[in-house]
């Protein structure tokens, strides 16, 4: 069975954008692949942070992932810092990664622009990301379009390491150099269709930093308080103005949460001004409840029994440490340690 690796930072409450754009996909993929989901807490410290908050966020994220359907009997859920080999391999890969390649990374340029003093960890972030994937010799990584550049770096690093340190086959290449076996697979992107969820302001992607999110575990009252004033088609000024559903974020949320028949009905009612935006949002709130109620219920159960979360993470750490030890055993031997 092919292996996939995916990481998520414990950077605060999961919102429905994270859920629809990533987590829901992993819940499905866990039945098709040997799936490792890592809570990448070492990645969360490249910007200033509070240690107590990090501890709490790691716990909350594990709880939310399990409540969302990541099944520890099917997938492996682990915490990055529970497997020290992540940082060991990252150091090794740092030694074969040119500075220029890291400086060209778009995410680094964007994040560094807002910092007075840029930590080296922010620059080396994609190397740790490569180490995360290569440590488990994952074949595929579920990614969105905006993460392809980071994955490409992981592929280049894998290729470079294989060419320098892979076990010699005894044959020669055309250029006379020794042919080497590839130890690290070059991880392939697993591009799956996931909705790009816009924030409630309708302007930018849903993100905590923009303050335009709906938390996955928020109460129905709180969700409604956010949905009610959310931006819709600006041409629907009066109740009788027809709208264009495709340009409305509420319609796209319907496509993520409502049944196909309801989505069809929404489009017709919008175009014909058959109903107002508040009617439309009420139906969306009901559809969201259908999906979110079981997640909230599981989250409450896990909150009452935190030992279940600890047990899932302990089992995940044990499996990941075993895989990491095997990889690093070969890496150390081939690199002369
Ligand atoms: S009716 Fe619904 S889809 Fe149409 S503009 Fe209003 S909220 Fe958006």
Image (cartoon, helix red, strand yellow):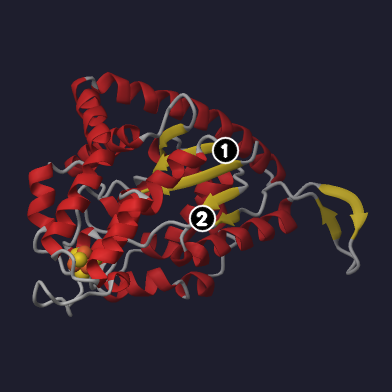
Residue to which mark 2 is pinned = 192
Total numbered labels: 2
* Residue 204 as seen in the image, left or right of residue 36: left
Residue 234 versus residue 317 in the image, above or below: below
* Residue 140 as seen in the image, left or right of residue 292: right
Q: Quadrant of residue 153?
A: bottom right
Q: Nearer the viewer, residue 329 or 112?
A: 112
Q: Which residue is rendered at x = 92% and y = 54% of the image? A: 171
Decide: few, some or many residues near mark 2? Use Cα within 10 Å; few <14, some 14-19, many ≥20: few
Q: Is mark 1 within 8 Å of ligand 1?
A: no
Among numbered discs 2 and 1, the one appearing first in the sequence? 1
Residue to which mark 1 is pinned = 32
Q: Is residue 50 visible?
A: no
Q: Which residue is rendered at x = 47% and y = 32% of the image? A: 76
- Residue 39, given in percent of the width and then of the height, sits at 37, 42
- Residue 237, given in percent of the width and then of the height, sits at 10, 77
Q: Quadrant of ligand 1?
A: bottom left
Residue 88 versus residue 240 in the image, above or below: above
- Residue 217, given in percent of the width and then of the height, sits at 20, 41
- Residue 314, given in percent of the width and then of the height, sits at 40, 24
Q: Which type of secondary structure does the marked residue at label 2 adopt?
A: loop
Residue 326 versus residue 288 in the image, above or below: above
Q: CA distance from mark 2 to mark 1?
A: 13 Å
Q: Which residue is rendered at x = 10% and y = 51% of the image? A: 224
């Amino acid at each position: 069975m092919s292996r996939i690796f995916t990481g998520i930072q414990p950077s605060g409450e999961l919102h429905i954008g994270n859920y629809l754009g990533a987590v829901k996909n992993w819940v499905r993929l866990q039945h098709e692949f040997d799936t490792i989901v890592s809570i990448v807490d070492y990645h969360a410290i490249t910007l200033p942070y509070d240690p107590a908050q990090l501890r709490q966020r790691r716990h909350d994220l594990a709880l939310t992932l399990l409540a969302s359907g990541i099944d520890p009997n099917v997938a492996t859920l682990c915490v990055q810092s529970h497997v020290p080999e992540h940082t060991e391999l990252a150091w090794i890969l740092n030694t074969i990664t040119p500075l220029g390649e890291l400086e060209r990374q778009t995410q680094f340029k964007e994040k560094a622009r807002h910092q007075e003093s840029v930590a080296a960890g922010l620059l080396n972030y994609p190397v740790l990301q490569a180490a995360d994937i290569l440590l488990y010799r994952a074949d595929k990584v579920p990614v969105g379009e905006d993460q392809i550049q980071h994955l490409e770096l992981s592929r280049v690093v894998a290729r470079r390491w294989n060419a320098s340190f892979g076990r010699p086959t005894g044959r020669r290449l055309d250029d006379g150099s020794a042919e080497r076996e590839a130890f690290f697979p070059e991880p392939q992107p697993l591009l799956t269709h996931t909705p790009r969820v816009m924030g409630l302001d309708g302007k930018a992607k849903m993100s905590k930093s923009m303050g335009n999110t709906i938390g996955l575990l928020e109460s129905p009252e709180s969700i409604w308080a956010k949905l009610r004033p959310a931006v819709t088609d600006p041409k629907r000024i009066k109740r009788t103005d027809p709208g264009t559903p495709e340009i409305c974020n509420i319609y796209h949320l319907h496509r993520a949460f409502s049944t196909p028949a309801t989505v069809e009905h929404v489009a017709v009612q919008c175009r014909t001004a058959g109903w107002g935006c508040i009617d439309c949002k009420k139906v969306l709130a009901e559809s969201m409840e259908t999906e979110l109620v079981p997640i909230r219920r599981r989250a409450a159960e896990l909150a009452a029994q935190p030992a279940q979360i600890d047990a899932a993470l302990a089992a995940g750490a044990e499996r990941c440490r075993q895989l990491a030890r095997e990889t690093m055993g070969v890496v150390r031997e081939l690199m002369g340690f």
